[in-house]
Amino acid sequence: MIIEINQACDLVIFGAKGDLSKRKLLPALYKLEKLNKIHKNTRIIGAGRADWNIQEYIKIAKTAIKSFLNEKIDDIIWKKFSTRLYFCNIDVYEKLHFFRLKKILNQKKNIIIYYCAMPPNTLHSIFIGLKNASLNPDSSRIILEKPLGVCLESSKKINNQISKYFTESQIFRIDHYLGKESILNLIALRFSNSLFFHNWNNEIIDHIQITVSEEVGIEGRWNYFNNTGQMKDMVQNHILQILTIIAMDQPESITSESIKAEKLKILRCLKSISNHNVNTHTVRGQYSSGTIKGKNVPSYIKEEDAKKNSQTETFVAIKVNIDNKKWFGVPFYLRTGKRLPHKYSEIVVFFKKIPVNLFKNSNLQEFQNKLILRLEPNENIKIEFLNKRPGLDQEYKLENSYLKSNYSKKKSINLIDAYERLLLESMRGIQSLFVSREEIEESWKWIDPIVEAWKKTKNNEIQLYKSGTWGPENSNLLLSRDNRVWYEFN
Ligand code: BG6
């Protein structure tokens, strides 16, 4: 029997007015209510600079859930959910305001969880405000959003600051990609199938491509995004997490510590990219106006709140090498961007070509077997191979075929949104799907020199790409230099 370890919590959301809270957190919490996963005494306390009373917050929460959840709100569930909602008007720079929060929290003896959905530069004030009002008991937990800091130094600073008030067992550093069903399934696929297990190295694999493509632009977050860019918004966290899960060795066990230790080894082996190779190994772009699915969209510098001369990247492509025995000579090509033609995430593993061609009139020379792992949407796994075209031809004619498993269509699967899973894990007090301090700092160590090199290297000035296309032309060049092409979306 599985023991339900769900506990009564007070979940305080700093940044209750913000995009993350409305777009992701509130809808995920409502879904958990629907799944009956929230303890009956749990409360949700929005915290932010607004003069809202509880009724106003409830109204705002309902509008947000309606707009961002792809389903009709159920009246009975909503009624139950809305009684959990509270609001606290707090300016995190005002120490005394934390006593308003204390008043609400003192009404119950729940486990307190703080969700910091706020920019990195506000975090220190939150930590100090909580400490000052004695709101950091040993039983409390704190969730920190990505990116943690804007570089290695600032990330270390935040980690050092928080360590004065909270212990590691209280800190939950979130990367929502780690809560996605398809990312968790990568671990199962790699380490439960001998077919993949034994063929996962540079003897068999030619190269690996990882694409995380988005149709959306900045969605009203220009000021946040312009200080971050696609590199720090997506690569430093989500994409490096995918890369480490794909490349790591088998962990000693399936526990959080063993997996984190293996991921860390990969991060430490990433070959550095800096001034001398930044032009051959990276591409950065920014979207200009264009059309996506028939809709005209503005350029990045014409978005709401935008500044005209911004050089912030909305697209990144990188050729990554891993300096260890297993992956020597196997490039990993990463690309991610906003305002691309489709929203999808995919990993494509290209296997080496057959050394001797028996089928002279075929396309075997160009062909490579591929394992295509579609992470989103419609999670599925495909293997591409060649077979004989049936018929009476004198010679063998080969044609491409696929084996496909539609992971998301399995009846038994109820795909859970990443935030639902991670919020639930934080309420249960389980840290295994969260990222360690070491992983974050190691990622910054690799990212910082690239960002620095971009600033210094003139040739690598930002390239514009039309919205609704697959990024700047140099992204294709990154692969064509190695006689390769990006695997096309289909
Ligand atoms: C967030 C980024 O972490 O991930 C956003 O800040 C991005 O810019 C989002 O759009 C993508 O997440 P998902 O789950 O939609 O792929």
Image: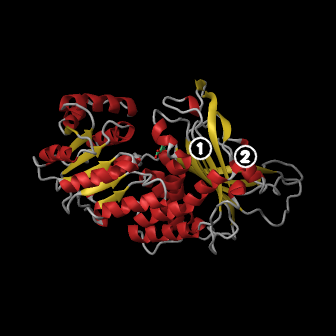
Q: Is residue 449 visible?
A: yes
Q: Mark 2 points at which residue?
A: 474
Name the residue: 67% across, 59% down.
275
Point out residue 203 in the picture as x, y percentages from the top left corner.
69, 71
Which amino acid, by three-letter code, is at mark 1? Glu
User: Would you say the residues marked 2 and 1 are in contact, meaning their CB atoms lie under 8 Å apart?
Assistant: no
- How did the renderer colour the structure? secondary structure
Upstream in sequence: badge 2 or badge 1: 1
Which of the numbered marks, if any, corresponds to residue 313? 1
User: Callout 1 environment at 10 Å: few (<14), some (14 to 19), or many (20+)?
Assistant: many
For this rendering, which residue is in front, 75 or 108? Answer: 108
Point out residue 124 in the picture as x, y percentages from the top left corner.
32, 54
Quadrant of the rendering where the C terminus is positioned: top right
**Regarding mark 2 in the picture, which secondary structure is present there?**
helix
Point out residue 484 in the picture as x, y percentages from the top left corner.
75, 53
Please identify the residue farthest to the left as the structure is shown: 107
Name above or below for residue 188 compared with residue 18: below
**Regarding mark 1 in the picture, which secondary structure is present there?**
loop
- Disc 2 versus disc 1: distance between alpha carbons? 14 Å
Q: Is residue 485 left or right of residue 397?
A: left
